[in-house]
Every structure is written in structure tokens, then in C-alpha cells.
Image (cartoon, helix red, strand yellow):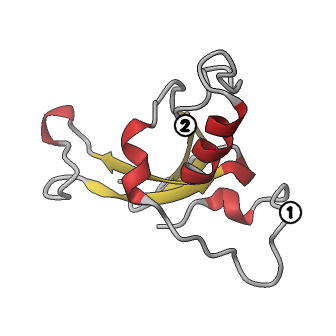
């Protein structure tokens, strides 16, 4: 799967080919999920899902935690969490959802500072 935000009109780096990222999956463990999930553009077989993750140096309003971290610490955290890997799992039943992909559609997407830590995914093969 591919985070569709990297193809968007607000990505200053997009050229002829989509941008490639190197994910730092070790950094993702302190990431918060402060926002809900939005959906849109449904068809008979697919739907677009959108959300945002919050890195540990920001609050739920996307503001840097200047009272918690000094400027040197913020710079280090922004470098460490520049790219974040987001795991997802989608299932028809909450009882069957898992990240091992046994009974769910699952995977991971990369997001980063340049696209405000947002993720977009087209979920297809819906019936």
C-alpha cells in the first residue's frame, strides 16, 4: 500500500516519480493517535480513509511541546520522528481484527513531517 498524501498537490517534492522514504519503525512506538479516521469518495468497491498521527513532541493541536522540551531536544525529536510508520488493520468484524493479517486487511504506511503526519489509504475489494 502507498500513502496517497505523497501524491497530493501540496507535496513540494513530487516530480515525475513518487517520493521514496526510509521508514524508522523503531521511532513509531511513542506516537499518539489523537485524531479520528475520516472516510470519503466511496464507490461500490472502495473507499478512501484519512487520519493523522501525533509525534511525541506535539500535542493534539499539532503544537510543539515547548514547555516539555528545550529547543535542542525538539530538534533531536524532530529528526528522530521525521518519518513515522503507521500500521493499520481493517476487518468486517472487531472480533476478527489483528495486525497479523489472518482475518484482516492490514499493512503499514509511511508518513512524515512534510505531509503533517497524515495518512491516506484507498481500501479496495469491498463487497
Residue at the location (68% across, 49% down)? 113
Q: Is residue 69 left or right of residue 23?
A: right
Q: Is residue 79 left or right of residue 13?
A: left
Residue 89 in view here:
yes
- Which percent across, then down, holds residue 58? 62, 28
- Which percent across, then down, holds residue 104? 23, 52
Comes first in the chain, label 2 or label 1: 1
- Which percent across, then down, holds residue 97? 20, 42
Which residue lies most toward the bottom here?
16
Q: Is residue 92 left or right of residue 38?
A: left
Q: Which mark is on residue 51?
A: none
19 is higher (above) or lower (below) than 110: below
| Pointer 2 local density, CA inside 10 Å: few below 14, some 14–19, many at least 20 | many
- 119 or 13: nearer the eye? 13
Q: Secondary structure at mark 1?
A: loop
User: Which-is-in-front pick, marks 2 and 1?
Assistant: 2
Residue at the location (86% across, 63% down)? 12
Residue 120 in view here:
no
- 126 or 5: nearer the eye? 5
Which residue lies most toward the top here?
67
Quarter-wise, where is residue 8 in the image?
bottom right
Residue at the location (46% across, 30% down)? 33
Residue at the location (23% across, 51% down)? 99
| Pointer 1 local density, CA inside 10 Å: few below 14, some 14–19, many at least 20 | few
- Which percent across, then down, holds residue 96? 14, 42
Q: Secondary structure at mark 2?
A: loop
- 122 or 112: nearer the eye? 112
Q: Which residue is mark 1?
A: 12
Query: Mark 2 near mark 1, Cβ–Cβ under 8 Å?
Result: no
The Cα–Cα distance between marks 2 and 1, rounded to whole angstroms, is 21 Å
- 28 or 105: nearer the eye? 28
Q: Which residue is mark 2?
A: 55
Amino acid at each position: 500500500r502507498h500513502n496517497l498524501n505523497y501524491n497530493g498537490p501540496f507535496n513540494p517534492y513530487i516530480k515525475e516519480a513518487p517520493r521514496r522514504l526510509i521508514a524508522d519503525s523503531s521511532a513509531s512506538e511513542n506516537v499518539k493517535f489523537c485524531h479520528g479516521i475520516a472516510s470519503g469518495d466511496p464507490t461500490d468497491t472502495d473507499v478512501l480513509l484519512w487520519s493523522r498521527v501525533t509525534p511525541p513532541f506535539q500535542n493534539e493541536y499539532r503544537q510543539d511541546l515547548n514547555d516539555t522540551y528545550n529547543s535542542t531536544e525538539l530538534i533531536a525529536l524532530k529528526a528522530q520522528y521525521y518519518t513515522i510508520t503507521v500500521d493499520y488493520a481493517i476487518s468486517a468484524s472487531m472480533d476478527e481484527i489483528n495486525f497479523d493479517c489472518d482475518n484482516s486487511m492490514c499493512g503499514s504506511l509511511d508518513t512524515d513531517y512534510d505531509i503533517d503526519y497524515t495518512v491516506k489509504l484507498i481500501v479496495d475489494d469491498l463487497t
